[in-house]
Amino acid sequence: MGRAYQNRKESMAKTSDMKAKVYSKYGREIYVCAKAGGIDPDGNLALRSLIDRAKKDQVPAHVIDKAIDKAKGGGGEDFSPALYEGFGPGGSMVLVECLTDNPNRTFGDVRQCFTKAKSKIGTPGTVQHLFDHLAIFVFDGDDEDAVLEALMEADIDVTDIESEDGKISVFAPNTEYGKTRQALVDAFPDIDFDIDQIQYLAQNPTPLSGADAEMFETLLALLNDNDDVQNVYHTVDG
């Protein structure tokens, strides 16, 4: 119960510089998503979800519109996804999701973040197998049975469903994201997702304390300060 999935909290940023970074990350992600899957949110569920999250994180409409208009033009930067794996302080494991127009630069920048935090970047496959790649949906509710029934009727291969503190969490294979989201919306038309995205979830949490915990916070700060970094997933408990 109560798995440590992450909900973006950048909207709580207190400085204009931090907010600008959040807007930039969303703008880049929306642009890439719209360019790959189409600019119509009704036909691109991933884009619709992304726009909803951006609005909840108080990203201005003009930032969202600009990213979509940019994708509509068909030109612009050629961003590609990149996933870096590394070993953090105290035996922790870290996955870093990026969108980059220069993989060599981004890899060097991410590696430098690890080095500054007395950590080590790994080779592909060294850490990823310690995470589950899942579609996660969190929303208000307490009737697990009704949710499970709706998903089973839609032939969704549900990984798990949890109910805690008036919230239901649905976990499904990442490949079932669109199908799962549509089934939930069809079954519960008024549904409002707190979390609606694909994430990496650590299979086994790593407790940290003292100097290791402080150094880990340094690593997170360095990574999140990089414009190419979109998400950071880790095994650290709490």
Image: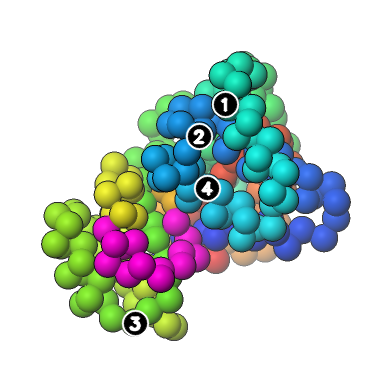
Q: Which mark is residue 82?
A: none
Left/right of residue 106 with respect to residue 207 in the rendered view? right
Q: Which is more toward the observer, 174 or 31?
A: 31
Q: Quadrant of residue 223?
A: top right
Q: Mark 1 near mark 2, Cβ–Cβ under 8 Å?
A: yes
Q: Earlier in the sequence, mark 1 or mark 2?
A: 2
x then y, percent, for residue 72: 57, 26
The nearer-to-camera label among 3 and 2 is 2
Residue with the most extreme right position: 16
Quadrant into which the C terminus falls: bottom right
Q: CA distance from mark 1 to mark 3?
A: 41 Å
Q: Which mark is residue 50?
A: 4
Residue at image coords 39%, 61%: 137
Percent position of residue 176, x then y: 27, 47
Question: Which numbered mark, 1 or 3, is in the foreground of this view?
Answer: 1
Is residue 197 shown left or right of residue 106? Answer: left
In the structure shown, which secondary structural element does the residue marked by tag 2 occupy? loop
What's the amino acid at mark 1?
A: Lys
Q: Which mark is residue 39?
A: 2
Magenta residue span: 183-196
Q: Which residue is mark 1?
A: 72
